[in-house]
Image (cartoon, rainbow, N blue to C red):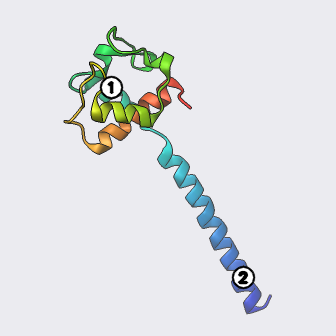
Amino acid sequence: MTGKALAGSWKRALCTGLMGASLYGGAQAAEPDMEAGRALFVNATPACALCHTLDDAQSSGAIGPKLDEIKPDAARVETAIRNGIGQMPAYTTLSDKEIEVLAAYVAKATGAQ
């Protein structure tokens, strides 16, 4: 094999490997941390579980909507957490990361699309 052909093979292999790692890494990064999200759902102040029913968190709140029924996506949950909605207060004490984790957890736990 010539040096030029060898260099071309090496570049293709590297690009293929990087692309595969990038795709794999992206899929991993998109997967929510269910344990951390569940802990936030149950332990935030005030706890989401006080008002909302969510089977995965074994909560049966009676004030807010049943999340398993409305299946909100992460963006909808994040907006509600940040701004409040109806009787639900805005969660100003949660960090941006905690809000993202909690929103992703609710969306995944409810099977949102």
Instruction: Specify whether residue 9 is in view.
Output: yes
Instruction: Specify whether residue 102 is in view.
Output: no
* Image-based side of 2 in relation to 110, left or right: right
Q: What's the distance in space between the residues labelled 1 and 2, CA to CA? A: 52 Å
Say what amino acid the circle numbered 2 marks: Gly
Would you identify the image quadrant in which residue 100 lies? top left
For the point 26% across and 25% down, the residue is: 43
Would you identify the image quadrant in which residue 8 lies? bottom right
Above or below, 31 relative to 56: below
Residue highlighted by disc 2: 8
Q: Residues within 10 Å of mark 2 (few under 14, many from 20)?
A: few
Task: Please identify, in this view, whether the residue under mark 1 or under mark 2 is nearer the observer.
Answer: 1
Q: Residue furthest right?
A: 1
Callout 2: SS: helix
Q: Residue 28, how many percent across, how many down?
A: 51, 47
Q: Residue 35, how many percent across, how many down?
A: 39, 31
Residue highlighted by disc 1: 41
Question: Nearer the N terminus, badge 1 or badge 2?
Answer: 2
Q: Nearer the viewer, residue 87 or 110?
A: 87
